[in-house]
Image (tube, helix red, strand yellow):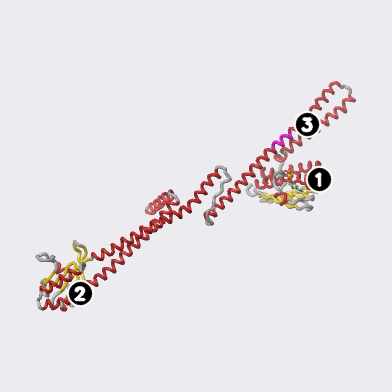
Amino acid sequence: MDRRVFRKAIERFWEIAGGVSVRTKILGIVLGGTILFGLTTVLQVRYALHQVLVARTQDWGIAMASDLAARSTDLVLINDLLGLYRLLQDAIAHNPELRYLFVVSSQGEVLAHTFGTGPEFPAGLIEANPLPSGAPYRLQPLRTPEGIIWDIAVPIFRGRAGVLRLGLRDTAVRAAVNTVTMWLLLTTLAVSALSLGIALVLTHLIVRPIRGLVAMTERVARRDFTARAAIWANDEIGALAQAFNTMVEELAQHEQMRAFYLQRIIEAQEEERRRIARELHDETGQALASLRVGLRNLEQTLDPDTLRPRLEDLYRLVDQTLNRVRRLAFELRPSVLDDLGLVAALERYIRDYRERFGIEVEMQVVGLNERRIPPTIETAVYRIVQEALTNAAKHAKCQRISVLLQASPRLLSVIVEDDGCGFDVEQTLRAGRESRLGLYGMRERAQLVGGTLTIESAPGQGTTIYLRVPLEGA
Ligand SMILES: Nc1ncnc2c1ncn2[C@@H]1O[C@H](COP(=O)(O)OP(=O)(O)OP(=O)(O)O)[C@@H](O)[C@H]1O
Ligand SMILES: [Mg+2]
């Protein structure tokens, strides 16, 4: 139960502390700390000062009482009560800390006192501080309506001539302690005001860059990538601002690249459509048109000898058209890739490639024959190998290409190697991507399926492309 209440209190504290601004928190800590320190100092000083002053005042009172006792000895012995009275009056007139003085004879009778004339000697005062015989003095604090009064009793002529009693006020001690306390409190107030001012300046220095950062992130959220955080100092907040700026620069770059690729994808799509339209119009359309003309001509020919070669021509035309349409369909998206898998699709592509470019391609497959891998990886690998082979045909001037596909339970690795002229990879990639989409496309596709692509090549050394795709969890 107790623990739950405690936890609730802590939660409530965090709710409140979390709700206020950083500035308020810092100001609260500084102000709270200063005031706490000031108040504990005031209390300690007050206590210590009080102790010291009380001890010193009491010592002074005892010395004063002893001195008066010594001087009153003769007066008591010769019974000079007027002299005794004058002695006491004189002492009290010169020492405002003294509340009263009186002398009691050994018979317990008041010989002289300073309470004025009349019967106003306080009742019970004589008995309030009994002096044991032989004691040099006795001190007894008395609680009176005027405050604490220290009553000091000292013997006169070792007690044989009576006892001198002295009442000492604590007002001087209290006044001194209160004055010091007030000065300390004023000092605390001044120091608090000063530290409040310093804290205000410091929090301003801390909060200003943070506000700048917040404004900047809001701009970035609105896709304004020109926003940059000002770096005010070389501290942690400066480092944060620097990190923010780097992040925004990278975001801007990614955004730029994304826009670029989007543009290229749209262009490529349009180009592909144009190619298909041209193919359909120029090739397939032409072929079907000639087929139609040929058929109409056949209507008028009934002679079998002329009919046969013409029919042969038409068959060839139909076959050619069919082939063109098939290739077009295959290039767009080979259905074997979906139906029979990556290996079959690549075999089919390579067979076609050999015929078209007259380049010797050797493909080796390890650990994949019985296995289907996820379709996204299949498509990626297919397109990457396709681009590598197209590049080899377009740029490498090579005779032989080898393609190796190797699958382990966790990793698929693909190597495409040609023996062509090679190229400077770094320089090509650095030269800009305006016209070179192939290499970037390969890398992007590899990254999209969580893989890596490495290109090794140098002028005159041939080119090798390494692709590694993790199959774990795929
Ligand atoms: N196998 C290779 N042998 C020799 N040079 C190559 C090879 N592959 C690529 N290159 C060089 O790298 C450049 C970039 O290739 P990339 O595929 O990015 O662009 P591309 O083939 O010129 O155009 P795209 O692929 O966009 O139609 C090529 O222009 C070529 O100079
Ligand atoms: Mg290319």
User: Horizontal and vertical percent for residue 341?
Assistant: 71, 42
In the image, the residue with mark 3 has its CB under 8 Å from the nearest atom of ligand 1: no
Left or right relative to 93: residue 179: right
Quick one: label 3 or label 1, which is nearer the N terminus? Answer: 3
Q: Nearer the viewer, mark 2 or mark 1?
A: 2
Marks 3 and 1, how far apart at CA: 28 Å
Q: Residues within 10 Å of mark 2 (few under 14, many from 20)?
A: some
Marks 2 and 1, how far apart at CA: 128 Å
Q: Residues within 10 Å of mark 3 (few under 14, many from 20)?
A: few
Q: Which residues are magenta?
A: 269-276
Can you tell which quarter of the image residue 127 is in? bottom left
Please report contact status of discs 3 and 1: CB closer than 8 Å, yes or no.
no
Q: Secondary structure at mark 2?
A: loop
Q: Residue at 54% of width from left, 51% of height from top? A: 230
Q: Which mark is residue 282?
A: 3
Left or right relative to 92: residue 319: right
Which residue corresponds to mark 1?
Answer: 359
Q: Is residue 357 visible?
A: yes
**Front position in the image: 140 or 182:** 182
Q: Is residue 382 visible?
A: no
Marks 3 and 2, how far apart at CA: 136 Å
Kind of residue at badge 3: Asp
Which residue corresponds to mark 2?
Answer: 137
Q: Secondary structure at mark 1?
A: loop
